[in-house]
Every structure is written in structure tokens, then in C-alpha cells.
Image (cartoon, coloured by chain):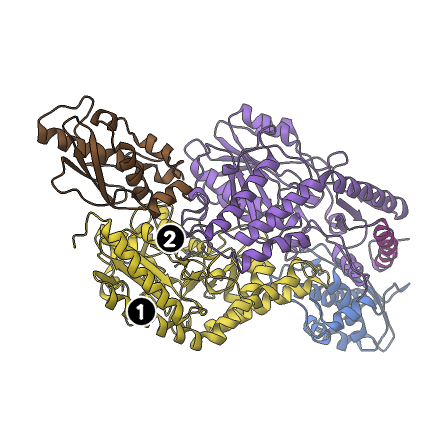
Chain colours: A brown, B blue, C purple, D yellow
Amino acid sequence: MYSEKVMDHFEHPRNVGEIEDASGVGTVGNAKCGDIMRIYFDIDDDQIIRDVKFKTFGCGAAVATSSMATELVKGKSVQEALEVTNKAVMEALDGLPPVKVHCSLLAEEAIHAALWDYAEKNGIKIEGLKKPKSDIGEEEVEEEY
Amino acid sequence: MYSEKVMDHFEHPRNVGEIEDASGVGTVGNAKCGDIMRIYFDIDDDQIIRDVKFKTFGCGAAVATSSMATELVKGKSVQEALEVTNKAVMEALDGLPPVKVHCSLLAEEAIHAALWDYAEKNGIKIEGLKKPKSDIGEEEVEEEY
Amino acid sequence: MEKIIYLDHAATTPARPEVVEAMMPYFTEKFWNPSSVYSPASEAKKAVSEVRERIADSLGTQSQDIYFTGGGSEADNWAIKETAEAYASKGKHIITSKIEHHAVLHTCQYLERNGYEVTYLDVDEMGYIKLDQLKKAIRPDTILITIMFANNEIGTIQPVKEIGAIAKEHGILFHTDAVQAYGQVPINVDEMNIDMMSASGHKLNGPKGIGFMYIRKGLKLRSFIHGGAQERKRRAGTENVTGIVGLGKAVEIAFETMKERTGKEQELRDYAIKKILAEIPYCRLNGGREHRLPNNINISFQFIEGESLLIMLDMAGICASSGSACTSGSLDPSHVLLAIGLPHEIAHGSLRMTLGEETTKEDMDFVVEKLKEIVDKLRKMSPLYED
Amino acid sequence: MEKIIYLDHAATTPARPEVVEAMMPYFTEKFWNPSSVYSPASEAKKAVSEVRERIADSLGTQSQDIYFTGGGSEADNWAIKETAEAYASKGKHIITSKIEHHAVLHTCQYLERNGYEVTYLDVDEMGYIKLDQLKKAIRPDTILITIMFANNEIGTIQPVKEIGAIAKEHGILFHTDAVQAYGQVPINVDEMNIDMMSASGHKLNGPKGIGFMYIRKGLKLRSFIHGGAQERKRRAGTENVTGIVGLGKAVEIAFETMKERTGKEQELRDYAIKKILAEIPYCRLNGGREHRLPNNINISFQFIEGESLLIMLDMAGICASSGSACTSGSLDPSHVLLAIGLPHEIAHGSLRMTLGEETTKEDMDFVVEKLKEIVDKLRKMSPLYED
Ligand SMILES: Cc1ncc(COP(=O)(O)O)c(C=O)c1O
Ligand SMILES: Cc1ncc(COP(=O)(O)O)c(C=O)c1O
Ligand code: FES
Ligand code: FES
């Protein structure tokens, strides 16, 4: 069902954990499946993401996308992190089964939520960042019969 | 599907053929399945059935019941022949499958038709014999779903 | 026991040894439910999707349009009842033919009891429907044309491509019961404009209790068997993995061998027909001449009745049928033979012999010899025959 | 590959070797269509009627009330849809429960879209329906009560005899989906006043794609699959003889071994439950205590999610499920776990392990050890868990 990359990130998730006194924390939940993801950022004065951690209550795809997403943003600038879409995460994982596409949105949204938190705390504005919805996952996968 | 007795009478039908200048001939047809049976009697002056022959266009059960029916009436008096019911024929054959019960009626009816013909030709009245229906087989077997 | 000559391949066929062999591991080691999450179950899932792919290939279509069912009858019921339900707002008129299998006819009659109207097209004396009659039968409220690909009793193959074109032109869905045709003649659902097609595993040397339906992408019809999310949520029930795998193997071999196999059968068929008609008086061939299933012989012998004939053939070790096996519970003469215009008593005296790839010329020579004897014996017993 | 511990017998079971062996001759030598007239076919017919007899015996009834189907889902659909149709003139109200299998629930929802009313009974926190609520739900237009014998997820066995008595008292038909119960617990259709009962072969070490429905004599419901005259004209389609023979063997062995087998399973079940609850914090057992399928364990682990749990168990060679396998296409938490009152996130973290006769104490010890590790690892990753 899952690609080898997904399984690898699921079995050995990178960056699990918490960051105390994080620069930004974002928690998002998925209405469709009840899963929850939290991302912590440690961002330095140059707006570079020095460290990132996550905690996820969710399916295999949710864990793997969390792990991959944190890998993809680590060391990047805030602006670059904004470019890490769910599509990018999925590609990096060699794809996800159709019913699991929505899980990758959770990761994208968690990044955005953490960045928003960081921006609010520091009174800065990040170009292109919108206030996160409190809840994602209403996007519909292909309806069958 | 058929008992051994039925198969024996089907494979080696007794009394197949015709009787020229028969004392009585009865032909009956079965509306339900389109089969036809004809019975020929040679009846002597004491109203004893000296010889009997049949021809049948019909299923295995029709052939076997014709054969058995002719055996049962051979040598009997006209009055006794009247007692040879389809039940008696079936019993003598060790039974018939439910869907084939109506075939045995054909034999009973053919006997009655031949006796009626005999009675008419000779201007006599046989106690208990009714004018044969031109067509039998409207009796219904157990209706299923 | 003496040798049995099996000439009833239209009723059912033996599963090929390769088919049984292919199924074996899925009964025991790979018994997994394909819907399960754990990795071993992916073996079962993969096996199922490979078969789906193979069947789709054989029809020139894509695998997601193939849905497994419990057999041909279920597929026929599904196609007709659920099309009726899904398109009721467009209309409640269905066109079919008088010579369909009971799985289609009785389903249509069921719909008639539920407010639908059904036109039963006549067929000509060979069993072909008439295209102009089909066109005339079409109404604004016609939602479905369901015409069988090939008839199970007389082997007549309908002008499916022409029917498909007419259906398409009028924007009407076209279902075909291809239970007898699939694996015997080439079928391309796109070229023939087939929207739905039923098939059954045990008619092509596959296992019993498995079949499939092709449903063109985009059709609105929904589940007939509701429940779990199997078959893209369109047909519930734990997948019959063994049956599917067996079906897949049967399809593989049927298509690989089609040309040679049916060529040989056709030759033998024509040889036997010619011989019977030449050597036995008062008989006629039923069904199509040019467009006929390669393995179907259907002959009426005047003055004799089918069951007696069958029993005597059986005594000689020959398995054949008279009308359709699954209606042998009924005593009425075959509706197909009546529809091609046979009188009752001739219809009763008809014999269907359907050959298989193992049938030999020697078999057919033996059968014709026996037939001659038996027909003669039964005619001597018949009140209809005067010689 | 390392050893696999299969703990998903509620999803499907391997066919027993004896079952496969019994089926073998019917694929090839005895492949006959049971409806055929010729004598060899009587072997197939006889095999089918022997199985019918055996199943009838197992339920304390007569063979003519057993009808073979393509599986449990078909039987459920048949019972509910055709009862609805046959008794519509009496009323259009049906009573079921919130924890039925989707084959029942989705069929009921289908009927709701077609003018029927359905009452979905609540269950208590163990999954039992409440008899007084059932009584209150009965209306003059109630025609059917359909309540499952035992639940596939949480193993709860309903008070079927009491339900049957209530149905009988009110002159309402009672159908029970016994797909999980048949072969596991004794069932007597007369004593329990069951009018219709569904079962499926692959849940009791029989083949997939075969099931049956018991229909009490005299019931008006007709065919769901229309066509040929098979199954006393109530279920069309060439009989799946191999499937039927396999089912028969499975039933034979299931009933012969029932007492010993389920006794052993029950012991192991209780051992494992006790151990898990003792050694892993924050978890609870779901489902009935006293009336529970002998092989069912269903436990919720707080703070973790089911799929992740399953994948990690899979990596350790353990096959289990979270919710029902056939709904794994769905992401919603199990409707059964929600109905017994679990909040969403707890329902998500539930694990079903269903034992088989081959399951050993060593297996379960290994599983509990692995579970401890995995639950711990996942909790460490969970934003809901603070230690
Ligand atoms: C309680 C219950 N009912 C019905 C079914 C459906 O049975 P099948 O998959 O054989 O159609 C199942 C199993 O999936 C079940 O557990
Ligand atoms: C033309 C046709 N349609 C449908 C069927 C029904 O198929 P099954 O017996 O597999 O349900 C048959 C065979 O019996 C058939 O010959
Ligand atoms: S199913 Fe919920 S995040 Fe994947
Ligand atoms: S079926 Fe016609 S007489 Fe037997």
C-alpha cells in the first residue's frame, strides 16, 4: 500500500519530539479522520529554521509526511518553508495512495500554522502566509460509488 | 433422477406398438408439456383385456408409465383396469420425481380414453367411467418461488 | 465406467488443471482478505488486480471498469435492475429480445411488475434480432437495450456492433449478456459500443461461482449488493480471491488458444451437423448459420421428445442437453425454440450438443451412430410417426 | 520470511486442507452442472443436497430451507430487500441496530432512499441492544427486525433468543446476520425463532465466494437474483458446486470441533485480554464480557491511532485489524465503536485481534510483548500523550 520511502519514514521517523520555548508551534487536526499533528520550530534571527520537531497522532501516511516535511524545511528560510507544499512532500515520499492524499495536507497545514504562530509572536508578516484554518481536510478525494 | 424400475421400463418398454382393429383406442395429450400417448386394447367378449399396446411421444416418465400401465392392465377385466390409477402406476415404478407426477396422469387418462372408445364402439356402459377430457395436465404441481 | 463424451459445454465446463493449480495457494497460504492492511494481504490484492487487468485487456478497456460478481446471473440482474433504478428519471422503458437467458428475461419481468415497460424483440427463424424492429422499438423513454451476445441454446451471435451503434446514436445504454460468447469470440467493448457486459467463469473452463461485469466509466448505476467498500464501492462482499484467480487463468488460456481452439471446434461442428442432417431424416438445424458459436449444434428431430432422447444418449455415455440446463426444472418447451418459430412438438424434440476442445472426430462419429439408433427407436415408439 | 501470527480470523480464514481436498474432484472430474439430466451430473446434485442437509442439521431445521448464495453480503441484501418488497403491503418499517455490518446497514439505507423507514437501535457500552427499546420501537407497520447474531468488531453476542421471541410475539419477521457466529456458537433456528439467517463460508475455514441463507418455510420473500430455476427457483445461477462442497466440509469440521476449539480459543482470549490490560496502561476492552465470540479481542489504546499500530504490528509479523477489514477504504472511525460510546480519538486507537484454532499461548505472549513496545513508541510520538 505504501511506498518504501513512506515505510522508511514511518518506521524511522525523523525529528520526533518537542522543542521547549519554540519560536513557533502549530497544531492542526483533520476533520475527516480525527488525526492531529503538531510541529515545533526553532527559528533564528535570520529567519532560518534551525530545528524542527513534530508529534503526530495519525495514520502511517500522517507520520511519514510529518517526518518528511520536517526534513524538507529543516535549515530552510521561513520563506522557503512556505514553498513546501503537500505535493512536494508526497513527491519526496514517492507518492501516497489516493485515499491518503489528504494526510499530506495535514503536514503542509501544520507548517503554516507553526509559521503563523512564529509570525504572530514576533510581530512580523510573512509574505504569502494566510491565517491557518482551524481545521483542514474537507477537500474531497475522488468520490466513488 | 428416476428410480431403477422407471429406468428399466424406459430402456425396455413393454408392449410398444399398435393393435390393428383394436377393441378400443385412446389418445391423450398433455397441455403442460405437449406430450402424447396412445393406448390400444384387445378386449374379449368377457371384457378381459387380452392384449394392450402403446405409443408415446413423451419424456422418460411418460414412456415408463405407459409401459407399466399396460403391464398392470394386461389380462385384467375392464372393470379392474379402471382401478389402475396413476398412483398405482407410480407405486409400481417405485415413485416419480415431483415434477413428473403429471406424466403418470397421462397413462391413467389414456387407459380411460381407450376404455371409453371400447364402450362406445360396443354400446356398453362401464360403471364409473367418465368421458375423458380431451386434454389433461392442468393439475398443478406444488408451486415454488 | 465406459467413456463419457461430454457435449454440454454450454451448461458448464470442467476447470482446466492450470486453473485449479493457480487457485490452490490462495485457499490456504495466501488466503488473505485483500482489504486488509498488513503486508501479506497485498499478495491477494495484487492477484485480484492482475486478473482485473487481464480481463480488461481482453476487452480492450481499462481495469477499473471490471467488477467481479458471483456469476453471470448476478451480473445480468445487476446491470438491468440498477440501470433501471439509476435512470428511472429519464424513462422506464427497456428493450430486450425474446431469446434472452432467463437471468435477463426474469429480471425484465420483475421490472415489469414494478412499473417498467419492456419490449421483447422478435427474432427471425435463425434467431437474429431485426435491426429495423429494434430501431422502431426505441422511444424517448427507453433507457436500456439488453441483447445477448450469443444465444446459449442455438448459438446465434447477434449483430452486436450494429446494436451498439444504434444504442449510442440514440443515447441509450447497451448491456449484453456475453456469458456464452466471452472467450469464444473476440469482443471489444469500445468498438462495439457496449456499456455493460456480463460474463461467467465456469463457461470458459474457469471455476463456478465467479463472474464479472464490465461497466463503462461514467455510468450512474450503483451497487446491487450493498455493504463493504470492495470493487470500488460497487459490489460488496469479501472478494472471492480463489475464484478470481481461477477466472484469470481461464481467461488467459481462453484468449491465448481462442483462434486455434475455436477453429477446430467449428470444423468439427460443421462436420457433425452435415453428417446428422444427411443421415437422419426429418431433422433440421436450429440457429444462425454464418454467425454462430463455434461449438454449438442444435438440431430438432421430428416426432420424438427431448428428454427421452437425452436419457438414451446418457445410457450411451453421451452428455447433451435439450433446451437450457438451468431450466430443466421446467416442462415447457424452450422459449428460444418457440421464438424462432418451431411448433411445440418440434421444439420438444430438439437436442443441443456443445463441443469442447477435447471433443474429437471419433467422438462425433460415435455420437452420430448412436443418434441414428436412438432416434429410430424413439420414432418407432411415437404416435406421431408413421413409417 | 519470519513467522506470521495471523490474528484476523474475523476478516477471513484459511480454508482447511480437508476443505480443499473435498473440493478438488468437483473442479475437474465431477464438474457437472447439477441441473443436467444425464446421470453423471447426479454426482454434483447429490453433493449439493448432502451439504444442504448437513447445514440444515447444524441449525436444527430441514434442508429445503437452506439456500446457497455468493456470500454473506448477498444473503443480507436478499433477506432485507426481498422481505421489504414481499411485505410492503403490511408495512414499510424495519428495525435494526447501529452496530450491524455494512451489508445490513447500507442495505437499510438503500431502503430508506426508497420509501422505507428504519429504526437503528442503540446499544449499551458493551454493544448489547436493549430489549425494552426494541419493544418500544415496534410499530403496527414493522415488518422486519434484523439484528446480527454476533458483532464482527467487538464480538458481542446479542440476546438472539429473546429478540426472536419478541419478534414472534408481534408477528414480525426476524433476520439475523450470523456471519460471525455460525460455526462458533450453537444456533437453533426454531428455538431462537429465527426466520432468516445469513452465513458465509470463508469465516469458518471454508472457501470464499459461497454463503447461505436460511429462510423459514412459508415466507413470502422471492428471488433477489432472478433467472434459472436453481435453489427451488429462489436463487438463480449455476450452482457453485465446488464452493458448496467446500462449505459443507468446513461446516462438518466446525461443528465437530466446536466445543473443544472454541473452549481453547476462549481461554487464550481471556488470558491475552487480562495480560494486556494489566501490562499496558490507558487501555480498555471493548465489547461484551459474558456473551462474546470466543475468539474476539478488541482493545482501545488511548493516545494512539489504529493504522500506525497495525503497520507496526505487521512489521513484527502480526496480522490484526482496526475496525472492520472491509471498510478499510474508509477513514471514519468504526461506527460500532462510536455506537458503544467511544470518543473519536479513542475509537481510532482500537485494535481487533481474532484468534484461530492454530493460535498458541506463545503467539499471544509474543504479541503482548510487541504491543507494549509499539504502544509505547507511538505514544511517545503522540501530541495527545504527556508522560
Ligand atoms: C457480520 C458480517 N456480516 C456480513 C459480512 C459479509 O460477508 P461476505 O464478505 O462473505 O460477503 C461479514 C464479513 O465481511 C461480517 O462480518
Ligand atoms: C446466456 C447466459 N446468460 C446467463 C447465464 C447464467 O450464468 P451463471 O449460471 O453463471 O449465473 C448463462 C448460463 O447459465 C447463460 O448461458
Ligand atoms: S488517515 Fe488521518 S491523517 Fe491519514
Ligand atoms: S414431461 Fe411430458 S409427459 Fe412427462
Question: Share a chain, discs 2 and 1?
Answer: yes
Q: Can residue B86 be seen in this view?
A: yes
Residue C176's place in the image compared with B80, above or below, is above
Q: Label 2: chain?
A: D
The residue where tag 2 is placed is: D89
Toward which corner of the image does residue C233 lie, by quadrant? top left
Q: In this view, does D101 lie to the left or right of B44?
A: left
Instruction: Determine if the magenta segment contains residue C105.
Output: no
Beta carbon at label 2 within 8 Å of ligand 1? no
Where residue D213 appears, x then y in whole percent?
A: 47, 61
Q: Which amino acid does label 1 sit on?
A: Pro
Residue name at image x 46 percent, y 35 percent: C92
The residue where tag 1 is placed is: D159
Task: Tell me the element at label 2.
Answer: loop
Nearer to me, C253 or C272: C253
Look at the magenta stretch and give its main secondary structure. helix
Residue D233's place in the image compared with C76, above or below, is below
Q: What residue type is labelled 2?
A: Ser
Beta carbon at label 1 within 8 Å of ligand 1? no
- View quadrant of ligand 4: bottom right
Residue name at image x 33 percent, y 61 percent: D370
Q: In this view, does D138 lie to the left or right of D258?
A: left
Magenta span:
C361-379
